Amino acid sequence: MKRVLITGATGYIGSRLAGALTQDCAVYALVRQPLNEAYLTPELRDRLTLLPYDGGGESVAAALAESRPEAVYHLAAHYTAAHDMGSITKLVESNLLLGAYLLEAMSMAGCRRLVYATTATTHFPGPDYRPLTLYAAAKQGFSDLAAYYTGEGKLRAAALALSDTYGPGDQRPKVLNLIRRSALTGAPLDLTSGRQVYDAVYIDDVVRGFILAAAALDRPGQAHSFFQLSGAAPRSLRETAELMLQVNGLDFQANWGGRPDPDRILERPQRLSPPPPGWSPRVPLEDGLRRFWAGTP
């Protein structure tokens, strides 16, 4: 059976990917203590081999030595839109330091295949590199680190850029979740104008994108490939939220414009890279929003 190592398995996307991979692979997960069990159900945990990460490179090297993976999926990250002194340490530790340890440990262990998550917001508002947030800059920093290892022939890597993701069981403080919670409780909710684009991809399509990106590593071509997952017909955030209420027969009036817009927002979809070979979204937005609201796959 194929062996894979995944980081970020305790997160929403990572847990779904880990579950899918266990159907055909022996899956090892690099995890921090104390263990975040928000998405790591007992059933999923029984199907994974958990390997500890203590913040140091030696624990990453030990995990690679024990798991001996044929491929690594790197999804661990720390996201924040804040730009202050308090956010720097976690941004660097999670998005750069762990990634640097992982790349070197893969090189030491002879693991040559890497798929990693990045963000479409590294380029704002066009094709030239201009990070929208410090988080986006940190994600670009990891791509730059990976470029050294791919350029030296130490591994092959596929970057998968994401915009917005959604699905049932999502507990992240994302705007659709906040609107859903307010609609269920009747609590008022102040939002921005909602004119920013909401290029949302359903969780099942996201998971399939990662698996297809890994398959693309076996094709001849560039050692460092860049792919992107995008919705079929992205709408604005406000249009998406109103469609969610409409398809679920709900009447909830959010206070659009009750909060100021950020200084910089994306008002049109970013199309930086092609999708992985063979990928296109299978779940239409209307169907995905029904499943999201119902909380069932």
Image (cartoon, grey):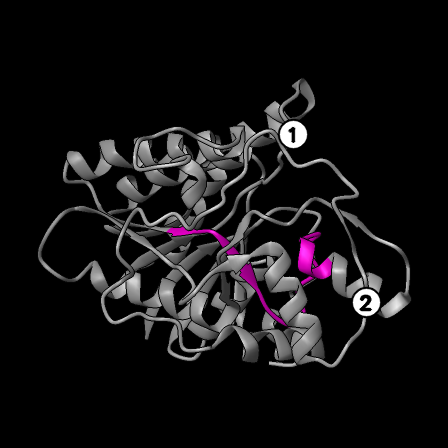
Local SS, label 1: loop
Tag 1: amino acid: Ala
Q: Is residue 264 left or right of residue 172?
A: left
Mark closest to the chain's N terminus, 2 or 1: 1
Please provide percent x and percent y for residue 66. 41, 54
Please provide percent x and percent y for residue 261. 66, 37
State the separation of the CA atoms marked 2 and 1: 29 Å
In the image, residue 120 sits, relative to residue 175, either above or below, namely: above
| The stretch drawn in magenta includes residue 174 | yes
Q: Residues within 10 Å of mark 1 (few under 14, many from 20)?
A: few
| The stretch drawn in magenta includes residue 63 | no
Q: Residues within 10 Å of mark 2 (few under 14, many from 20)?
A: some
Magenta residue span: 161-177
Q: Write the residue at 32% across / 75% down.
A: 1
Q: Which residue is mark 2?
A: 252
Tag 2: amino acid: Phe
Q: Which residue is mark 1?
A: 82
In the image, residue 195 sits, relative to residue 70, either above or below, namely: above
